[in-house]
């Protein structure tokens, strides 16, 4: 700066011969003003352009419910191609739905007597193999989603072939309504049921080049259930003959069942890692209070125990204030300091259209709070099922994800944001 002032003085002597002092003063003041303005910017703003996130989950769930994306080879391939073009980096394809596997399974053949979902579009194919091959060619992270967990249709072969595996309410009834569908639930406390579910999971991990595997609340149990004879006898055995409370919301009865499910989750985690140590264990639950109270799924405890390596919290809320409040709970903030925590955002349902503006706003609120990313439920409502035109929806997604970025992988060096 001293050199600059000296130059101004010398320049002044020369300039006085040619111009008025008034003109010189104007130029000097203008130059000093420009320099002061430049120096007022942060240093990084002077030398760096805005950069893309180092990593960010940009995921979507693929399912065979209200969606035909999986039922035709070329359609599936084209869908993965389009997701890649829109800078998505992660897909969660369903592999266990409606009481069937969506891949050829020897475990299912033995127990259910069918190795594959009987839907015609799946016959003669291995869609999981197709998804892994095409997905990895496109640079997509592939994490199969164990969607139905312990749940099955009431009229499924699984329910008919293994009625002793089912659990019930205190009045003996078994049917749980999910929309218009009648569901039943396998008893997660029975060793045979646990072995069957674990065998399905290990079969996937062993036979496919997947990047991880994901569970959700269906890996728990509706809290109104658990009154079958086997579970009641087990509870009595561990409580000196005392029967469980008839109030299914009783805190001790809830805690006992939730702890049993946690113990099974630990076994599953160990089995997965013994099969493939770099296979991520991901969970996509509802917020903790709902998961624990209504599904006995204590994901907060799972995270503390280190058996959860990736969390995608389902925050399917239209009210923005409610949406934001779910991101602020202590257990969510605690998990964010240990593992990648992303947010599941509702892109729509078959009979519910969610505007792109709402989706974009929610994504921004997630980014503002330094979450690891977002995933959308579900593929078909990204642009195929919506009141808005597909082209408009895809333009909206391009605005959200203008450049590619990588999946935030805990096992590949992910670190929490400061």
Image (spheres, grey):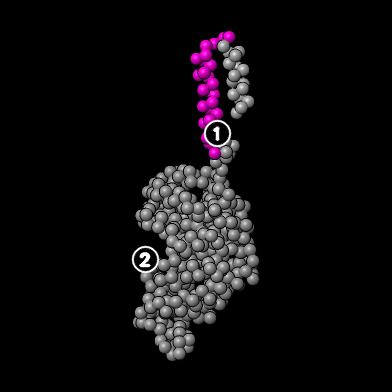
Comparing 277 with 81, the one in front is: 277
Residue 247, disc: none
Q: Is residue 105 visible?
A: no
Magenta segment's dominant SS is helix
Comparing 381 with 77, the one in front is: 381
The relative height of residue 76 versus residue 185 in the rendered view (above or below) is above
Q: Tell me the element at label 1.
A: helix
In reply to whether residue 21 is colored magenta, the answer given is yes
Q: Which residue is mark 2?
A: 179
Q: Tell me the element at label 2.
A: loop
Q: Which residue is mark 1?
A: 39
Q: Residue at x 61, y 22 (%)?
A: 6
Quarter of image, res 73:
bottom right
Task: Count residues near mark 1 (Cα–Cα under 10 Å), then give few for <14, some for 14-19, many for 20+.
Answer: few
Q: How many marks?
A: 2
The relative height of residue 163 versus residue 125 in the rendered view (above or below) is below
């Amino acid at each position: 700066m001293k050199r600059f002032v000296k130059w101004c003085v010398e320049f002044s002597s020369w300039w006085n011969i040619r111009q008025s002092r008034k003109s010189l003063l104007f130029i000097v003041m203008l130059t000093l003003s420009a320099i002061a303005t430049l120096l007022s910017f942060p240093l990084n703003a002077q030398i760096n352009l805005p950069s893309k996130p180092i990593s960010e989950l940009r995921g979507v769930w693929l399912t065979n419910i209200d969606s035909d994306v999986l039922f035709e080879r070329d359609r599936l391939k084209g869908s993965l191609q389009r997701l890649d073009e829109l800078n998505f980096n992660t897909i969660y394809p369903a592999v266990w739905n409606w009481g069937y596997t969506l891949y050829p399974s020897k475990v299912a053949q033995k127990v259910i007597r069918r190795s594959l979902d009987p839907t015609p579009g799946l016959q003669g194919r291995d869609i999981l193999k197709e998804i892994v091959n095409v997905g990895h060619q496109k640079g997509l992270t592939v994490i199969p989603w164990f969607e139905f967990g312990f749940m099955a249709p009431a009229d499924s072969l699984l329910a008919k072939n293994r009625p002793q595996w089912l659990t019930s309410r205190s009045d003996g009834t078994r049917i749980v309504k999910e929309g218009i569908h009648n569901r039943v639930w396998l008893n997660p406390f029975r060793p045979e049921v646990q072995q069957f579910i674990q065998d399905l999971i290990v079969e996937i991990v062993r036979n496919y080049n997947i990047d991880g595997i994901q569970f959700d609340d269906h890996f728990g149990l509706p809290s109104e259930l658990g009154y079958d004879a086997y579970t009641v006898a087990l509870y009595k055995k561990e409580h000196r003959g005392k029967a469980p409370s008839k109030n299914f919301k009783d805190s001790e009865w809830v805690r006992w069942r939730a702890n049993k499910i946690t113990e099974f989750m630990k076994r599953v985690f160990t089995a997965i890692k013994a099969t493939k140590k770099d296979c991520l264990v991901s969970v996509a639950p509802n917020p903790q209070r709902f998961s624990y109270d209504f599904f006995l799924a204590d994901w907060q405890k799972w995270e503390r125990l280190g058996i959860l390596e990736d969390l995608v919290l389902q925050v399917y809320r239209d009210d923005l204030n409610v949406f934001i409040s779910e991101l602020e709970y202590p257990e969510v903030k605690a998990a964010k300091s240990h593992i990648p925590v992303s947010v599941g955002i509702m892109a729509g349902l078959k009979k519910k259209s969610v505007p792109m503006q709402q989706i974009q706003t929610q994504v921004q609120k997630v980014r503002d709070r330094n979450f690891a990313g977002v995933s959308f439920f579900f593929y078909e409502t990204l642009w195929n099922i919506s009141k808005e035109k597909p082209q408009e929806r895809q333009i909206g997604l391009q605005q959200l994800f203008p450049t590619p970025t990588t999946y935030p992988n805990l096992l590949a060096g992910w670190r929490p944001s400061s």
